[in-house]
Every structure is written in C-alpha cells, then in structure tokens.
C-alpha cells in the first residue's frame, strides 16, 4: 500500500522521540529521515523503525476513567437504586 505524507510524518515523529531518548544519533536520524521521504510504501516505512523498540501506548490524561471503571460505577448506582426501591416499596 502506498504511503501518505501523514504516514511519513508519523514515522518521523517516532524517529524524533527515539533520537531524544538517545537510541539514535543525529547522523542515524538524518539517514532515516531521508529514507522516510524516499519511501513509497508502508512496508518501506516500517523498515526504517524495525530495529527500534515499540513505543508504549500514551497514558490516559489525568482524571480519565477506563471503560471498566464506568461499568463498575454504573453497577453500583443500579444496585443502590434497587435497594432504595426495595426499601420504599417495603413500607407501603
């Protein structure tokens, strides 16, 4: 599949992060960026970073809750509502 300019920019950003982390020298970075700009396919882009470790997923922003936490909260709210309904109807 053909590589887009957005694909190339994404790979360059990865290379910048690895250079900042000390995994690539500035010369290596320059060589790889040249390879990125000349790449025509996604496979050619992938070869530029294949010897670098994968990047961890970005952390959730502070205060963000996971989907599992939302389910637990919804379950607790539903249980409280059921208990309150049981209490209300037991007094009738």
Image: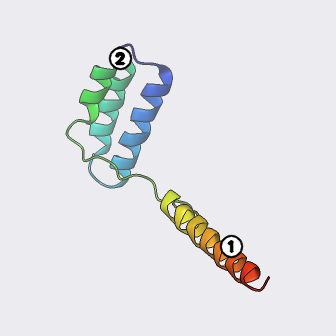
Q: Residue at x 51, y 60 (%)?
A: 66
Residue 49: percent from left, percent from top = 27, 36
Q: Relative to residue 80, is residue 37 drawn left or right?
A: left
Residue 22: percent from left, percent from top = 29, 54
Q: Secondary structure at mark 2?
A: helix
Say which mark, if any, is on residue 81.
1
Residue 63: percent from left, percent from top = 60, 68
Quadrant hosting residue 52 = top left
Q: Relative to residue 71, is residue 51 drawn left or right?
A: left
Q: Residue at x 34, y 21 (%)?
A: 42
Q: Is residue 23 above or below residue 64?
A: above
Q: Which residue is mark 2?
A: 38
C-alpha separation, residue under disc 2 versus residue under disc 1: 62 Å
Q: Residue at x 68, y 78 (%)?
A: 86
Q: Is residue 4 above or below residue 51?
A: above
Q: Secondary structure at mark 1?
A: helix
Quadrant hosting residue 85 = bottom right
Quadrant hosting residue 35 = top left
Front in this rendered view, residue 60 or 55: 60
Report whether residue 65 is seen: no
């Amino acid at each position: 599949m053909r590589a887009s300019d957005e694909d190339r920019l994404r790979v360059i950003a990865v290379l910048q992060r690895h250079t900042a982390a000390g995994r690539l020298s500035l010369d290596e970075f320059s060589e790889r960026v040249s390879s990125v700009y000349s790449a025509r396919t996604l496979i050619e882009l992938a070869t530029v970073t294949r010897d670098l470790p994968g990047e961890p997923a970005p952390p959730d922003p502070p205060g963000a809750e996971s989907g599992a936490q939302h389910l637990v909260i919804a379950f607790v709210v539903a249980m409280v509502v059921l208990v309150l309904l049981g209490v209300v109807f037991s007094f009738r």
